[in-house]
């Protein structure tokens, strides 16, 4: 029997219950096991995790999470309740144990995480105080977006694409020894092979950092079908984890407690008798306790809960994954599920108190990402001012600064998949060492190194991005052609950084070995198109794509990036010796302002030609073309597009909507001084996206664009330039053809 309420809570119910669809009768033995909260204020966790009271209250918390999740989703006939529903006992058990720094690999578990933040009061920071508020703000702008965001009070990290959450857990574990970071994994996402392989490499590199707890919610289904691991036996799943380095795998299978005669390997614990539900809840709590203690004591541990997807909500399996139009509060199946999960007013009060006490207070006040991490002071960067007469390798110049920074900040981590030496960055390895269990000075490696080198761009980007989001400094190094394999998590993190209420170091990347340097390697290594991807993100307002033209500018770009906050900073730097064209001070100005004149010739009888270039190696044909254009009677100005984001107009980008705003965009007068002329040719050694700020803003009527077209195997960079119409002949021909 349930009582229905609309906008006010039932008699005796806490104020946050206003808007709850149903209330239920007290559970059996409520007075025995729920006389007081199992979580003590002093400990922030259950005084005795093995007590029947704690198991009973975990069960209450689990059903509370299911109830809130389902009613919230049904209010919008939208959202994903089924996956989290099968995790409810595991999540509640971790909270009962005081472990509230929980992240997830499963973006579709968002409604459950929001329910937890609602129950502990964290969402009051968004003005969400009652169930009515929660329903109104779910999946709405300035509310609770469909997948997790770190901008929501108490939520540590975003979750969207599968296979990202474990990186945040590992980053948190590195930065906060002694704190447990559970990460829930879905068996749908477990089919993405890099989840466990990333953990395997991390554990090999950091064997002493085990204070994260992968928690597999093994429910048999993914989004629209059975999961790819649904046919594994329990022993097979244990072996799967053990093969990835887990020394201890603790598995609780709901099937072992079933007294309802459910068919199949996956069952719904909410269909058990109350006594068996209690036994199951106690087993989950005990397993979570053992797993947490094991992980915190130095053993790589996995916790697995096997329970049917959709347990305790309106339907089961993949059909429970999300709600469809018509799946509203009035639908019989949803109404029945809410009635079955409805708690009494007294139970809601107890549940709220346990959630508020867990971990020492609401997550919005206690989880590690709600505070700014203290960082080592860096002081002035020891840049080297290369002379204008020199040739120098830009990437190597940056490497010297990276090595210095790593010495100043021992928590700083460099990640790389393809080998630093191949990018002219051996100086990083020499100073900071590759992190590897085998000490070998020949290869600059050892167990204490700061260079993390898995052969996976996803793992590299993931750890670097996670460290930055959680408040530490990092650097992801990659070949330009392979960076796309890791970029999705960088996009996720930079979007999250735009929304944060706290400062965090920018996610910094250095991409080397540009397409024009990769002649003999052929088109497999000539993939600069990622520049277009990142260039499109410049409009977000906190993403910067930097093209330092020489070694001085590369140093200035790195200094600029590593002293910024809440941004995504991507530096494209050559690994080849190139002419130094800017002093260090001129480079610093160019990085801040967006562009700089590298050459200004006298006026010519045929007018002024502006050659605006994004890149470094492409400047070689640009300067060669300059001599020939001047011989043709043109005055020539060569402008380096060092930081194209700064060349946009204020209304082109969302700069005013992001954290740590940077509104120092180039003014019209300064822009005109750089780019006004009789003819304008915008040139890129990669694709044309980075040229957009100039092309949409320049007033020159006669304009053209030269950019990357496609790759091929060539013996020299010159041949590749010629193939793409970027050689001096092509530049001169394009200028001469303009206006004809």
Image (cartoon, helix red, strand yellow):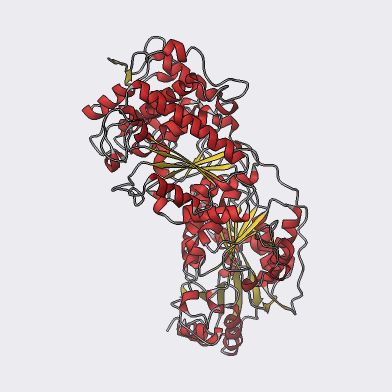
The x, y position of residue 194, in whole percent, is: 47, 56
Q: Can residue 720 be seen in this view?
A: yes
The x, y position of residue 238, in whole percent, is: 45, 47
The x, y position of residue 393, in whole percent, is: 68, 74
Judge by depth and name the residue closer to the eye, 172 or 586: 172
Depicted 419 relative to depicted 107: above or below: below
Left or right, 190 with respect to 624, comes to: left
Q: How many labels does the image show?
A: 0
Based on the displayed image, in which of its 4 quarters is residue 132 positioned? top left
The x, y position of residue 99, in whole percent, is: 55, 33
At horizontal 29% and vertical 22% (from top left) the residue drawn is 339
Judge by depth and name the residue closer to the eye, 643 or 576: 576
Left or right, 396 with respect to 94, comes to: right
Judge by depth and name the residue closer to the eye, 660 or 699: 660
Depicted 410 relative to depicted 57: above or below: below
At horizontal 61% and vertical 52% (from top left) the residue drawn is 506
Depicted 152 relative to depicted 357: above or below: below
Q: Can residue 470 be seen in this view?
A: no
Left or right, 517 with respect to 269, comes to: right
Q: In which quarter of the image is the C terminus?
A: bottom left
Judge by depth and name the residue closer to the eye, 410 or 193: 193
């Amino acid at each position: 029997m349930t009582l229905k309420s609309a906008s006010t809570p039932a008699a005796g119910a806490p104020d946050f219950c206003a808007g709850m669809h149903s209330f239920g009768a007290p559970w059996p033995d409520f007075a025995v096991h729920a006389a007081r909260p199992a979580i003590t204020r002093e400990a922030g966790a259950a005084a005795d995790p093995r007590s029947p009271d704690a198991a009973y209250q975990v069960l209450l918390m689990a059903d509370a999470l299911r109830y809130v999740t389902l009613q919230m989703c049904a209010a919008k006939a939208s959202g994903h309740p089924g996956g989290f529903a099968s995790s409810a006992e595991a999540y509640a058990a971790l909270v009962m144990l005081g472990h509230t720094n929980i992240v997830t690999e499963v973006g579709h578990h968002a409604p459950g995480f929001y329910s937890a933040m609602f129950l502990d009061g964290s969402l009051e920071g968004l003005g969400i105080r009652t169930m009515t508020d929660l329903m109104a703000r779910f999946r709405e702008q300035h509310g609770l977006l469909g997948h997790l965001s770190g901008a929501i009070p108490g939520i540590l990290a975003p979750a969207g694409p599968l296979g990202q959450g474990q990186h945040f857990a590992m980053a948190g574990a590195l930065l906060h020894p002694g704190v447990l970071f559970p990460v829930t994994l879905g068996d749908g996402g477990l089919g993405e092979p890099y989840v466990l392989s990333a953990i395997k490499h991390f554990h090999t590199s950091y064997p002493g950092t085990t204070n994260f707890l992968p928690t597999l919610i093994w429910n048999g289904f993914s989004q629209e079908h059975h999961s790819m691991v649904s046919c594994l036996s329990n022993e097979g799943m244990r072996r799967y984890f053990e093969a990835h380095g887990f020394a201890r795998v603790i598995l609780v299978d709901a099937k072992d407690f079933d007294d309802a005669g459910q068919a199949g390997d996956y069952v719904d614990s909410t269909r058990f008798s109350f006594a068996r539900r209690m036994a199951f809840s106690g087993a989950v709590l005990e397993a979570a306790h053992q797993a947490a203690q094991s992980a915190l004591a130095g053993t790589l541990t996995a916790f697995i809960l096997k329970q049917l997807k959709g347990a305790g909500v309106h339907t089961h399996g993949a059909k429970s994954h999300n709600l469809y139009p018509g799946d509203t509060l009035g639908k019989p199946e949803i109404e029945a599920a809410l009635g079955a999960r409805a708690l009494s007013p007294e139970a809601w009060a107890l549940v709220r108190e346990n959630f508020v006490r867990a971990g020492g207070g609401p997550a919005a006040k206690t989880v590690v990402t709600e505070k700014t991490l203290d960082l080592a002071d860096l002081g002035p960067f020891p840049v080297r001012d290369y002379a204008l007469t020199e040739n120098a390798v830009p990437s190597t110049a940056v490497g010297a600064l990276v090595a210095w920074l790593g010495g100043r900040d021992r928590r700083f981590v460099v990640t790389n998949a393809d080998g630093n030496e191949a990018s002219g960055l051996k100086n990083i390895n020499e100073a900071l060492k590759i992190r590897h269990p085998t000490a070998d000075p020949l290869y600059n490696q050892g167990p204490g190194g700061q260079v993390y080198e898995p052969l996976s761009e996803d793992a590299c980007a993931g750890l670097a991005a996670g460290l930055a989001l959680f408040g530490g400094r990092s650097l992801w190094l990659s070949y330009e052609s392979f960076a796309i394999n890791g970029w999705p998590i960088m996009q996720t993190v930079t979007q999250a950084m735009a929304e944060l209420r706290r400062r965090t170091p920018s996610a910094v990347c250095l991409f080397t070995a540009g397409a024009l340097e990769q002649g003999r390697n052929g088109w497999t290594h000539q993939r600069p198109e990622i520049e277009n991807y990142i260039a499109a993100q410049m409009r977000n307002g906190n993403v910067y794509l930097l093209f330092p033209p020489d070694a001085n500018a590369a140093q200035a770009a790195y200094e600029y990036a590593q002293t910024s906050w809440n941004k995504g900073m991507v530096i494209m730097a050559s690994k080849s010796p190139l002419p130094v064209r800017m002093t260090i001070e001129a480079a610093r100005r160019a990085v801040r302002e967006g562009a700089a004149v590298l050459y200004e010739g006298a006026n010519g009888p045929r007018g002024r030609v502006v050659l605006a270039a994004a890149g470094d190696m492409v400047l070689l044909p640009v300067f060669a073309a300059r001599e020939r254009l001047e011989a043709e009677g043109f005055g020539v100005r060569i402008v380096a597009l060092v930081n194209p984001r700064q060349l946009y107009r204020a209304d082109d980008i969302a700069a005013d909507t992001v954290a740590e705003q940077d509104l120092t965009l180039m003014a019209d007068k300064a822009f005109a001084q750089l780019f006004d002329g009789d003819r304008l040719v915008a040139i890129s050694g990669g694709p044309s996206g980075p040229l957009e700020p100039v092309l949409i803003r320049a007033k020159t009527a006669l304009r053209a664009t030269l950019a990357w077209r496609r790759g091929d195997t060539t013996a020299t960079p010159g041949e590749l330039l010629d193939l793409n119409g970027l050689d001096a002949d092509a530049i001169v021909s394009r200028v001469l053809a303009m206006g004809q």
